[in-house]
Image (cartoon, helix red, strand yellow):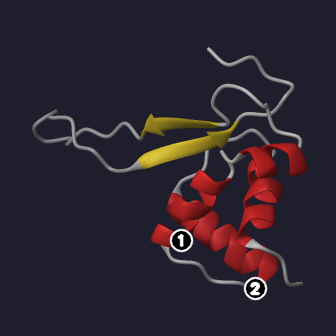
Amino acid sequence: MKTTLTRALVTLMSNGKPWTFWGLQEAINNRFDEFYGEPTISAGIRELRRVGNRRKYGLPMTGEVISKERIPYSNPLSGKYLARGYQYRLITNNEETS
């Protein structure tokens, strides 16, 4: 089933759970039989912030529509914090942003 990247992102991310680029990449490939690289998925997430896409997909017209959180990871040997990427979550009209 052919679909746009933006529609695929909204479809997958509307469940409210956090997603990594890698998780989105795999889910898009499995569900829509399309492959997008991480930079393209990042651009697609940015596209969700545009007014036209907010209207089209029923997203909040003000405030942020994507929540971004660092994935916590620390080295088990040193206990030192290491950055391992981010998780992104779509914020819908049913949610309050903080």
Amino acid type assigned to the residue bearing label 1 in the image: Thr
In this view, the residue in front, 74 or 97, is 97
Give the residue at x 72% y 34%: 91
Question: Helix, strand or loop at disc 2?
Answer: loop
Residue 57 appearing in the image:
no
Q: CA distance from mark 2 to mark 1?
A: 16 Å
Give the residue at x 32% y 40%: 73
For disc 2, the neighbor class at 10 Å (few under 14, some 14 to 19, many from 20) is few
Q: Nearer the viewer, mark 2 or mark 1?
A: 1
User: Where does label 1 land, which residue?
Assistant: 40
Q: Which mark is residue 33?
A: 2
For disc 1, the neighbor class at 10 Å (few under 14, some 14 to 19, many from 20) is some
**Where is residue 98, by image quadrant?**
top right
Amino acid type assigned to the residue bearing label 2 in the image: Asp
- 67 lies above or below 37: above
Q: Position of residue 74 (x, y in %)?
A: 25, 38
**Mark 2 / mark 1, whichever is N-terminal:** 2
Q: Residue furthest front?
A: 51
In this view, the residue in front, 80 or 57, is 57
Could you tell me if the residues under marks 2 and 1 are in contact, i.e. CB atoms within 8 Å?
A: no
Residue 61 appearing in the image:
yes
